[in-house]
Image: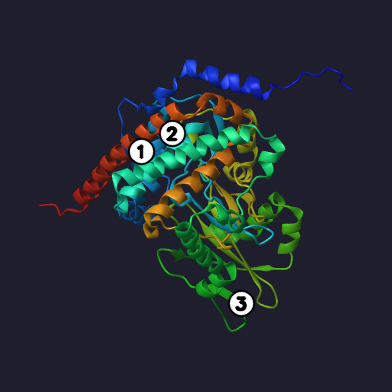
């Protein structure tokens, strides 16, 4: 037995370490944008080369729909801009794409409805403020897109930033175990909302409760003469899978079952694979490989799973943030899907029990349930007061997610009372929203030029 023992840093020591980081990067510098050359359309074009070619036009169409849709699809572009700007240097496990549309409802294993982050494709370690800047800028862009006043947008961003700084400070005073068990049960949290916000939440809850796997199966499939359920193909959003995938599907699902928990693997023994299709999802994800796999038992009970391609995180590829050795080794041995699954489990209070991963031909995937009471809040449908409340709720979720990292107390020490950080991040969010709008205009203009007939 090794009798040597060294105590870990105390909370006070971690707070001092965070405060000392201000010497390296003063908090006012968090307002600074990158000053070097930029190639926004080049980054988007480079990403398109890794996507399914026939789906690139659909991705372009969805990104061109609005300035907010464009922002949703440009996490890589923002990561590149963040990499070239001053940052705190305090890394936490990060979502990587924490805009307001990547939060929502889902069912826990106990069938309670949760509110949390719901997209982890880009999850990796990064400076804590990168997630917060992504969120704050999305509030500005989303607020502008829905015609809200500058004063109201400012109020919503300030509310979100205040909630984050307060949340991190509060979490740092808790034990790591208490932070771990913190989660946002929707029903229990409603008492904190004003009347208008509770009304908006209830409407979103009703929508989420209707989005079940069983309902999706009824909508997307039909039974043949033998009772086998088959997906209804509808190009370009639902199409046949590639022959190499169809031939390997049994082996791929076997890989998935070995990556998930024993109880889920046993549960799936009750079912057999009925059908597989390729499915187009999201805005930024269009063109990546995504499938639906339908499982069916002898009594027409079903399970619907969604394998989705996991590529290198933009925080690494464009943000250029070196990852901890443990995560780098995991990616090398198990693939990018394992990264997504592991960081989702870290960042969410309670996660989908069906989470798992696999490695297909030349591509990594993670697997999750499809439509298990998953729903989102449509900011276009929110009145002004619920819009501010929703911004606060998203920020509280990010604070909880970041609080799982050992460095969270250093973040609290760096932030301090919060006033300086809030002012800097508010300024950055407005300035970057202007840049994103200019990038969107250039993107749309480029598409119009390409579509113009040659004289």
Does the residue at mark 2 contact the one at mark 3 (Cβ under 8 Å)?
no
In this rendering, position of residue 94 left or right of residue 255:
left
Label 2 or label 1, whichever comes before in sequence order: 1
Mark 1, Cα crowd under 10 Å, few <14 / some 14-19 / many 20+, is: some
Q: Tell me the residue that label 1 is attached to.
A: 43
Q: Tell me the residue that label 2 is attached to.
A: 318
- Residue 447 percent across, percent down from the top left: 24, 50
User: At 68% across and 58% down in the image, what residue appears?
Assistant: 109
User: At 67% across and 35% down in the image, what residue appears?
Assistant: 174
In this rendering, position of residue 425 left or right of residue 165:
left
Mark 2, Cα crowd under 10 Å, few <14 / some 14-19 / many 20+, is: many
User: At 43% across and 32% down in the image, what residue appears?
Assistant: 422
- Residue 226 percent across, percent down from the top left: 62, 82
Q: Is residue 138 visible?
A: no
| Of residues 369 and 452, the one drawn nearer to the viewer in this rendering | 369
In this rendering, position of residue 271 left or right of residue 443:
right
Q: Secondary structure at mark 3?
A: loop
Q: Is residue 227 visible?
A: yes
How far apart are the two marked residues, 3 and 1, measured between alpha carbons?
44 Å
Q: Which mark is residue 228?
A: 3
The figure's colour scheme reads rainbow
- Residue 35 percent across, percent down from the top left: 31, 25
In this rendering, position of residue 441 left or right of residue 131:
left
Q: Secondary structure at mark 1?
A: helix
């Amino acid at each position: 037995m090794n009798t040597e023992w060294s105590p870990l840093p105390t909370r006070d020591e971690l707070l001092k370490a965070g405060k000392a980081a201000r010497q390296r990067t003063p908090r006012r510098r968090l307002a600074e944008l990158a000053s070097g050359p930029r190639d926004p359309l080049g980054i988007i074009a480079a990403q398109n080369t890794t996507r399914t070619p026939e789906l690139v036009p659909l991705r372009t169409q969805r990104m061109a729909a609005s300035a907010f849709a464009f922002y949703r699809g440009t996490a890589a572009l923002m990561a590149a801009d963040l990499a070239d700007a001053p940052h705190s240097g305090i890394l936490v496990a990060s979502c990587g794409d924490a805009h307001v549309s990547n939060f929502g409802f889902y069912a826990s294993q106990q069938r309670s409805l949760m509110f949390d982050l719901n997209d982890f494709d880009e999850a990796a370690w990064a400076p804590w403020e990168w997630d917060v800047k992504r969120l704050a800028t999305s509030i500005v862009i989303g607020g502008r897109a829905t015609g809200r006043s500058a004063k109201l947008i400012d109020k919503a961003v300030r509310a979100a930033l205040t909630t984050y700084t307060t949340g991190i400070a509060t979490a740092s005073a808790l034990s790591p175990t208490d932070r771990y068990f913190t989660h946002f049960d929707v029903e229990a949290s409603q008492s904190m909302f004003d009347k208008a916000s509770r009304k908006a939440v209830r409407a979103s809850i009703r929508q989420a409760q209707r989005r079940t796997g069983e309902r999706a199966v009824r909508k997307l499939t039909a039974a043949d003469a033998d009772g086998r359920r088959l997906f209804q193909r509808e190009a370009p959003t639902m199409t046949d899978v590639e022959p190499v995938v169809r031939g390997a599907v049994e082996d791929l699902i076997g890989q998935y079952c070995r990556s998930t928990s024993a109880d889920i693997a046993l549960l799936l023994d009750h079912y057999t694979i009925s059908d597989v299709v390729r499915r187009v999802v999201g805005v930024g994800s269009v063109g990546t490989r995504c499938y639906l796999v339908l499982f069916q038992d002898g009594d027409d009970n079903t399970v619907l799973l969604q394998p989705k391609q996991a590529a290198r995180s933009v925080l690494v590829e464009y943000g250029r943030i070196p990852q901890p050795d443990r995560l780098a080794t995991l990616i090398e041995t198990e693939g990018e899907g394992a990264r997504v699954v592991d960081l989702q489990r870290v960042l969410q209070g309670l996660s989908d029990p069906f989470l798992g991963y696999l490695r297909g031909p030349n591509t990594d995937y993670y697997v999750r349930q499809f439509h298990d009471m998953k729903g989102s809040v449509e900011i276009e449908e929110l009145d002004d007061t619920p819009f501010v409340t929703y911004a606060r709720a998203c920020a509280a979720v990010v604070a909880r997610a970041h609080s799982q990292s050992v460095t969270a107390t250093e973040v609290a020490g760096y932030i301090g009372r919060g006033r300086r950080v809030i002012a800097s991040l508010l300024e950055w969010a407005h300035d970057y929203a202007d840049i994103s709008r200019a990038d969107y205009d250039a993107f749309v203009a480029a598409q119009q030029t390409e579509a113009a007939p040659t004289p």
